[in-house]
Image: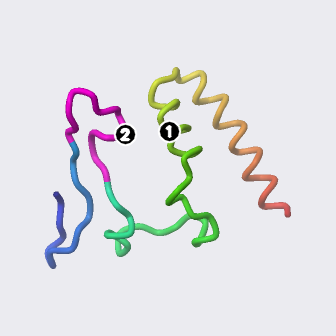
Amino acid sequence: MFLDDKNNYICEVRYGGASANALQRGLWTNTKNAIFYFDSITNGWIDYSHNLTLVRLFSLALNSTEESHKQANEILQKDIDRLKNL
């Protein structure tokens, strides 16, 4: 676990067991516990706490090619641009 000089939580490293997937291993943070270090890019209007679709997206991205990442980025950017114009 990584803490700041005032003993406030920043992030942690998770190892997981043999059956753990990529999202259960590596550098991880609970942003609710590290609120001083993270800003919401949506200023709170999107809540990711129970967004299983987003979890699935990350899972797929971690197991796909760079070409797929490029295609996904284009789709996501079009949606962001659409939201900006509402």
Instruction: Give the class, few, some or many, for how many residues have Cα within 10 Å of label 1's Cα (few <14, many ≥20).
Output: some
- The quadrant of the rendering that contains the C terminus is bottom right
Q: Amino acid at mark 1?
A: Phe
50 vs 4, left or right, is right
Q: Coloured how?
A: rainbow
Does residue 36 lie above or below 72 as drawn? below
Percent from the top left, x then y, of residue 39?
47, 69
Q: Is residue 37 above or below residue 12?
A: below
Nearer to the camera, 56 or 3 = 56
Q: Which residues are magenta?
A: 15-28
Q: Inspect the magenta stretch and tell me whether residue 83 lies in it.
A: no
Residue that appears at 50% across and 39% down = 58
Judge by depth and name the residue closer to the eye, 42 or 49: 49
Query: Which residue is label 1 attached to?
Result: 58
x and y, in percent, of residue 31 in the image: 38, 64
Residue pointed to by mark 2: 23
- Front residue (pair 65, 21): 21
The x and y percentages for residue 40 are 52, 67
